[in-house]
Amino acid sequence: MSLPVERPHVDPDNKTTMELQAVLPLTAKVEDGHLFIGGVDMVELAHQVGTAVYVMDEEHIRKQLRDYLEWTRFHWKNVDVAFAGKAFMSVAMCRIVEQEGCHLDVSSGGELFFAQKAGFPMERIICHGNNKTPQELQEALDARVGRIVVDSFEELRRINEYAIERDMKQPVLIRVTPGIIADTHVYIQTGAEDSKFGFGMRDGLAMEAVKRAIALPGIEFMGIHMHIGSQIFTLTSFAKAIEVIVHFMDEVYEETGVFVQELDTGGGLGIAYGAPDQPSSIKQYGKVVVDDIKEHCLAHRIPVPRILIEPGRSVVANAGVTLYTVGTVKSIPNVRTYVAVDGGMTDNIRTALYDAKYEAVVANKADQPRSTVVTIAGKHCESGDIVIHDAPLQPAEVGDIICVFTTGAYCHSMSSNYNTQVRPGVYMVKDGQARCVVRRETYDDLLMCEIFD
Ligand code: LLP
């Protein structure tokens, strides 16, 4: 077991909610000391529907998708934006993505099933996974998904076989690892050569995969996919990977005479988890990714491909918050104060897993300065169940509503039933209305798969 991380001393920052701009959902406001999102009073909502609960700012989500479309298509008309469903999957989210004219990236049979149930157009689906099961692949083919991203020779062989059985040709992208180490947590780096994902370029495997894809009768080779990692702050990692990939596209043309028609650059744009964080904007990202692809293609004298991007986190993370109720406050003199809430690692595993940082406020004291520093602890049976270590916070009392920001991505989708905890519901807020899009689980839901003899 590793030792606990050494943490720097944190002082109260005396900030009020509206000073945490970088992490606030688009429509966050403070009125009469209460935090409002989407025109809805978070304190009232928490009291009405109970906590813990996830709340998502619908306008914020839609704006992110529109910004991605605008700032990529500004540079090249032939760009599509696929939301990475793993960041936040629900039927309501699939519908928003559909309404905004975007594509959807699914990474399992379950995510594909959600998209189908939401009535999402299957031609706009991109299927992912480094080990899609034979069943998942056949489900994808039967659904007539737009693209399958191929991760291995075995998978290529299977897709070809299933496509021939169905008398069809399946359009695919070949996933290539560009050998770039992205500047992010090692668990979420994916573009390095030593990776479980995709085909390496230096060892010739990527070229071999492309050649087989072109030759196989059940496969329609459409292009190349890459994804170098997630929560990436410096755009230079993207720029480096694009340079390498476009060079590879040129090699494909040289060796096969086939132009790569599509290039999918994956997701990965970082976002602010802490108020001082300064991630790159969607506008800057669009310029680097799309302009660089264009420039390198021009330099290599190959056609500019249709470009696909797959943002997840940067669409939903800052749109979402989690509301909790303070259950106990425990002060250990000269050590720290624990503020325990009615959730924790079951609704947000990211602190325990990645040592992720979050900002929080007391939603019913949102206009007060964060004049204390406390550790916000979960309710689960282990010491690592912490939501925020050393969080500047307004003085918290039992019954207060705590709002943790930036929980819209990879919290609901990575939630669990540990301790046989029911998972929270999700509310979309907009124009003063709160709409339940995922209801809180019940004890009966927890029993659903149990067999009683
Ligand atoms: N495309 C592919 C192929 C991916 O694997 C991912 C994320 C994305 C797109 C979306 O990346 P984003 O824009 O969200 O960075 N559970 C981790 C994140 C894992 C990301 C996995 N792949 C976390 O909570 O930070």
Image: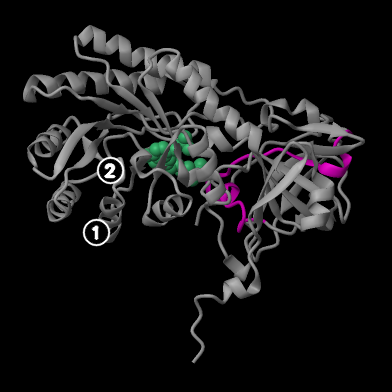
**Residue 253: horizontal and vertical position, in percent?**
12, 21
Q: Is residue 75 above or below residue 49?
A: above
Q: Which residue is mark 2?
A: 148
Neighbourhood count class around disc 2 (C-alpha, 10 Å): few under 14, some 14–19, many 20 upward: many
Confirm whether the magenta stretch covers residue 360.
yes
Q: Which residue is mark 1?
A: 134
Residue at (67, 25) in percent of width and height: 276
Disc 2, SS: strand
Q: Is residue 434 left or right of residue 214?
A: right
Q: Which residues are magenta?
A: 344-367
Camera-side residue: 221 or 311?
221
Mark 1 and mark 2: span between their CA atoms? Answer: 13 Å
**Residue 147: horizontal and vertical position, in percent?**
29, 40
Q: Is residue 270 above or below residue 1?
A: above
Disc 1, SS: helix
**Residue 452: horizontal and vertical position, in percent?**
51, 88
Q: Is residue 180 above or below residue 358?
A: above
Q: Is residue 41 above or below residue 315?
A: below
Q: Quadrant of ligand 1?
A: top left
